[in-house]
Image (spheres, helix red, strand yellow):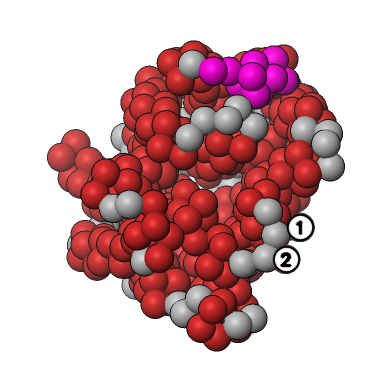
């Protein structure tokens, strides 16, 4: 104990003494992997319009999209395992090590999808291998969110944690935006037939290459935990997490369910919604979403800074209340919209509401758990709620549409956001807990 104390103090002091420039580099390094992970994960959703028939040749377009959405959702089912596995690694062996492993795993999954033969070549083995690749990516992303959210909250400057931590969703959204931009460029230079035949593979190769850049940046990150904390018996222990911090765990589950559901409804699913329900062309829908996501990313630091002033709990209550009230009217209006400009305005309004949650999503979770189980607490609770509600958003929406009851999906999202509001009202302000200094 005596020999580790000076080392612990030195490690803690090193993080405390980081200059603003060093903190910014740390945020960039951590978030770079976040961008790559989410680019690779979302390019699947955005390119599904082109490759769905290659893996599921039978059925109408809605059925094909339903099948690919099912595999998208299956990737989310691996997230709780990833949240547990990488949370344990991060709490016991350091945040940096966990982040480096997760980005390498995502790279492998993307390369696998890029090289997969189609149904016409290997039959039913094609969708099976596609599922395997998505499960591998889901495991990686399940670990990435909790670890990077924890790291960014720990390395951020006190008093401005909301602002700094908001860049996690800037890069998360940036991953979606980059996916849309790459798809838009491909649409300019390749015909529809070329995209269907082979062009959809290009973004997966690009994402895998970008992972190497992120790996290089993450190698030099400062570790934010001490040796003493990593060697604690409670470090990375699920039993300790549930026994001593069960209320915090359930609270995170409560507001993440609604937050994840509405996030995916107005981001990844929205492109399909504009095409499949509003009747827009694929190209127009992609451009509308590109502009909306760019604005959405720019909103995050503003709402993060706002939380530093008004408190995380207040931001969460405002999110839940506004989302519960406004989701159904906005989705209904989008279903019949004819103007791309009006569609963009409506989506941007919805994303402004969602920003009250996403800008502080990782931070508010990190503030609820002590350092010994922080990465595990953040990653596992988020992954479970995200897998059940976020990962199934597209599938549930398309299922309601196929059943002829699409408006039920709008109400489903509204109700879950109302639940998030109730949870936020009942919880203490986590920024005042003192667990995250």
Report the predominant secondary structure element of the magenta stretch: helix
Q: Does 91 lie within the magenta span? A: no
Residue occupying image coordinates x 56% and y 60%: 52
The residue carrying pointer 2 sits among few (fewer than 14), some (14 to 19) or many (20 or more) residues within 10 Å by Cα, namely: few
**Of helix, strand and loop, which one carries label 2?**
helix
Give how far apart the Cα atoms at labels 1 and 2 are. 6 Å
Q: Is residue 39 left or right of residue 397?
A: left
Asked if residue 412 shows in the view, the reply is no
Residue 291 % position (x, y): 36, 27
Residue 122 in percent (x, y) is at 55, 85
Task: Give the number of the disc on residue 243.
Answer: 1
Task: Between residue 380 and residue 154, name the one nearer to us.
Answer: 380
**Segment tinted magenta in the rendering:** 328-338
Q: Nearer the viewer, residue 350 or 27?
A: 350
The reply to whether callout 1 and callout 2 are in contact (CB within 8 Å) is yes
Q: Which residue is mark 2?
A: 239
Task: Report the side of 358 relative to 422 (left or right).
Answer: left
- x%, y% of residue 271? 52, 37
Q: Nearer the viewer, residue 111 or 219?
A: 111
Instruction: Evaluate whether residue 402 shows in this view.
Output: yes
Quarter holding the N terminus? bottom left
Mark 1 burial class by Cα count in 10 Å: few <14, some 14-19, many 20+: few
Quarter of the picture containing the C terminus is top left
Q: Quadrant of residue 410?
A: top right
Q: Is residue 110 above or below residue 292?
A: below
Q: Secondary structure at mark 1?
A: helix
Residue 288's disc is: none
Q: Residue at x 64, y 32 (%)?
A: 277
């Amino acid at each position: 104990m005596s020999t580790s104390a000076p080392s612990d103090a030195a490690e803690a002091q090193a993080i405390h003494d980081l200059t603003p420039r060093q903190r910014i580099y740390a945020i960039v390094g951590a978030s770079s992997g976040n961008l790559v992970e989410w680019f690779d994960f979302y390019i699947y959703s955005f390119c599904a319009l082109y490759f769905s028939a290659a893996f599921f040749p039978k059925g109408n377009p809605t059925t094909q999209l339903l099948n690919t959405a099912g595999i998208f959702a299956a990737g989310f089912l691996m997230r709780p395992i990833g949240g547990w596995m990488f949370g344990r690694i991060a709490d016991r062996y350091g945040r940096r090590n966990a982040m480096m492993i997760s980005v390498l795993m995502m790279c492998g999954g993307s390369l696998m999808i890029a090289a997969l033969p189609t149904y016409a070549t290997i039959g039913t083995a094609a969708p099976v291998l596609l599922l395997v690749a998505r499960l591998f990516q889901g495991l990686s992303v399940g670990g990435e969110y909790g670890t990077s959210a924890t790291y960014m909250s720990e390395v951020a400057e006190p008093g401005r944690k909301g602002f700094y931590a908001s860049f996690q969703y800037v890069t998360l959204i940036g991953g979606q935006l980059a996916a849309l931009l790459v798809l838009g460029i491909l649409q300019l230079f390749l015909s529809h037939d070329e995209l269907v035949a082979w062009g959809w593979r290009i973004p997966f190769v690009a994402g895998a290459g970008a992972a190497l850049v992120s790996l290089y940046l993450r190698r030099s990150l400062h570790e934010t935990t001490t040796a003493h904390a990593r060697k604690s018996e409670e470090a990375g222990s699920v039993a300790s997490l549930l026994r001593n911090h069960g209320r915090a765990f359930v609270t995170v589950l409560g507001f993440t369910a609604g937050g994840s559901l509405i996030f995916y409804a107005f981001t990844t699913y929205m492109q399909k919604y504009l095409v499949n329900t509003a009747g827009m062309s694929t190209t127009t829908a992609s451009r509308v979403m590109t502009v909306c996501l760019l604005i959405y990313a720019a909103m995050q630091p503003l709402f993060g800074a706002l939380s530093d002033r008004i408190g995380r709990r207040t931001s969460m209550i405002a999110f839940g209340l506004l989302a519960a009230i406004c989701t159904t009217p906005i989705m209904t209006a989008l279903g019949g919209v004819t103007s791309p400009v009006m569609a963009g305005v409506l989506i941007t309004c919805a994303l402004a509401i969602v920003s009250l949650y996403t800008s502080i999503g990782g931070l508010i979770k990190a503030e609820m758990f002590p350092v010994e189980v922080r990465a595990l607490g953040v990653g596992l609770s988020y992954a479970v709620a995200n897998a059940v509600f976020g990962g199934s958003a597209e599938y549930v929406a398309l299922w309601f549409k196929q059943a002829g009851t699409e408006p039920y999906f709008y109400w489903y999202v509204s109700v879950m956001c109302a639940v998030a509001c109730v949870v936020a009202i009942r919880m203490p302000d986590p920024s005042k807990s003192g667990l995250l200094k």
